[in-house]
Amino acid sequence: MAIQDDFPILQRLVNGHRLIYLDNAATTQKPAVVIDAMNDYYTKHNANVHRAVHTLAGEATDGYEACRTSLKSWFNAERCILTSGTTEAINLAAHAWGHPQLKGRAIVLTEMEHHSDIVPWQMLAEAFGNELRYVPVKDDLTLDMEAYEASIEGAGLVCVVHTSNVLGVRNPIEDIIRIANENGARVLLDAAQGAPHCQINMAELGADMMALSAHKMCGPTGIGCLLVNEETFQEMKPFMGGGDMIETVTLEGSTYQTNEHRFEAGTPRIAEAIGWKSALDYLGKLDLDEQHQRLLEIARYVADELRSLGMTVYGRHDDNDSSVVSFLHPTLHSEDFAHLLDARGVAVRTGHHCAQPLLNRLGISGTVRASFYIYNTMEDAEEFLTHLRDILERFA
Amino acid sequence: MTYPEQLSELIEDFKSIDDRMERLEYVFDLASEVNELPTSEWDDSTRITGCQSEAHVRVDLEDKNVRLYSGADSKLVQGLMGILTIAIDQQPIETAQALTPDFAVEMGILNSLSPSRSNGFRNMFDKVMNDLSGVE
């Protein structure tokens, strides 16, 4: 059975056309097994986790905690705090670790970051006076590593995107972490785009924190995690207070849990965790390396075709890059393109992709972005290009 | 509500088009209906906020009739401006001010564009109406 058959949504028509879903860098579609797992939870096991002794609560707790166990194993991480997504994970890092530990030390960021890995640090810097240093992006769309080395002295933290959501460029994470470690700085990886495309071994990389979202890797929306190594975890202070994160509460004060629950106040995302675990199981049955190569070939082909049609393509598509193709036409506005493609059933993204500093660096305000994932085929790419050629003929 | 004749015709035209692509194509064609506001005159006072593209509009009065000058870097947005131009340009100010954005719903163009673009149309309409109160 083909992978496409596992995704019910791919059967639908959009505006009378077969759906060609190329907005995977924003969110991926969900296989039936994920939808079924969440449905099964609500149908048969729904209960709150951790406290109650009844059977349903036990089943719900097992399902929720199984997601954490799978994530630790998948990414070879010591600690896994479940959050609402990458954005909350980075905000948690800023409040729970950055606030108490950085104490006015500099934070190194890059021009390539998503807003979710810029704004929380700007807010921290505004409150506590940290210096923010930005590593520039060079004309060849890679990070300026000399500038990075020059910026590291005295920094307490390096925040870097594993793979750019706009360019698909996979950054030299190994070198970035090595240089940070040599200079006594911790590293937070934004792996929202990297995690769906390759197997990331956090312990082997030596990253201290890593943030990601389920929905970009076939899981549900509304859940993500902050993976943390033990040393960093022990330095984190509780951020959000409430139920489930405490050991005892008296009118005089409270004591907190010592495990990950310390950072998961309130009723967590139980169905979503169960769905994410199911997504990991599903992806685990695929050869992700093989998929990566196949999708990269599609991206390279599409990028070449777009260039031949007079588009500017913003990307390199090197061996480790993701299958994202950002492009612009010299006269047809990106928003117009997206509407005209949508009328033919093709879903692409336009705009600044929540990376305005990067687009400012590129001297543009937005791009059209086609991003491919495991269920996309060369046939999708060909059909996308056929629609695109037709649009150019009629409107450009 | 009764609309000026040319707007009524346009509403009927749009109603007769079922295909989304053709509808968009028609909006594209209407981009040429605007009285062009040169880009050299685009500034913060002419900018329409809430659009994902650069869109600008200026409203004047000529013998108590509305004159609408506009432009955008997106053809679809400029097409929406063309529709507004057909609706109110050279109309008495009272007629223009009596208009509500409901006509766009009746035309079905708010269904054929994305929520952000539809909000953009609403913002465009509101700015024109606000500017009209200012030039009265």
Image (cartoon, rainbow, N blue to C red):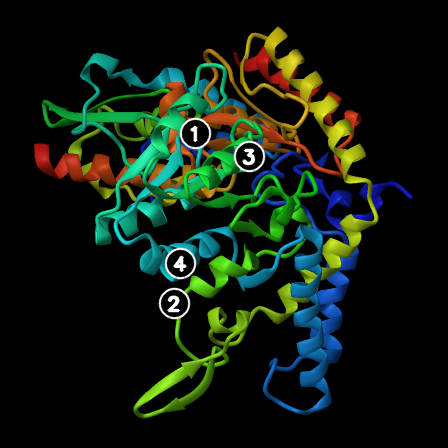
The reply to whether the C-beta atoms of the residues labelled 1 and 4 are less than 8 Å apart is no
Tell which subunit mark 2 falls on: A
Give neighbour class at mark 1: few <14, some 14-19, many 20+ (Cα, 10 Å): some
**Which quarter of the figure has residue A333?**
top left
- What's the amino acid at mark 1? Leu
**Which quarter of the figure has residue B45?**
top left
- What's the amino acid at mark 2? Phe
Asked whether residue A177 is in view, the answer is yes
Q: Earlier in the sequence, mark 3 or mark 4?
A: 4
Give neighbour class at mark 4: few <14, some 14-19, many 20+ (Cα, 10 Å): some
Mark drawn on residue A173: 3
Asked whether residue B6 is in view, the answer is no
Which residue in the protein does label 2 denote?
A239
- What's the amino acid at mark 4? Trp
Q: Residue at x 43, y 18 (%)?
A: A138
Q: Secondary structure at mark 1?
A: helix
Q: Identify which residue, B47 or A188, lies in the foreground.
A: A188
Q: Identify which residue, A47 or B95, lies in the foreground.
A: A47
**Compared with residue B39, is residue A355 higher up or lower down, i.e. above or below?**
below
Which residue in the protein does label 4 denote?
A97
Q: Secondary structure at mark 2?
A: loop
**Compared with residue B116, is residue B85 higher up or lower down, i.e. above or below?**
above
Answer with left or right where residue A395 lies relative to residue A196: left
- What's the amino acid at mark 3? Ile
Q: Residue at x 30, y 91 (%)?
A: A252
The reply to whether the C-beta atoms of the residues labelled 2 and 4 are less than 8 Å apart is no
Q: Quadrant of the N terminus of chain A?
A: top right
Tell which subunit mark 1 falls on: B
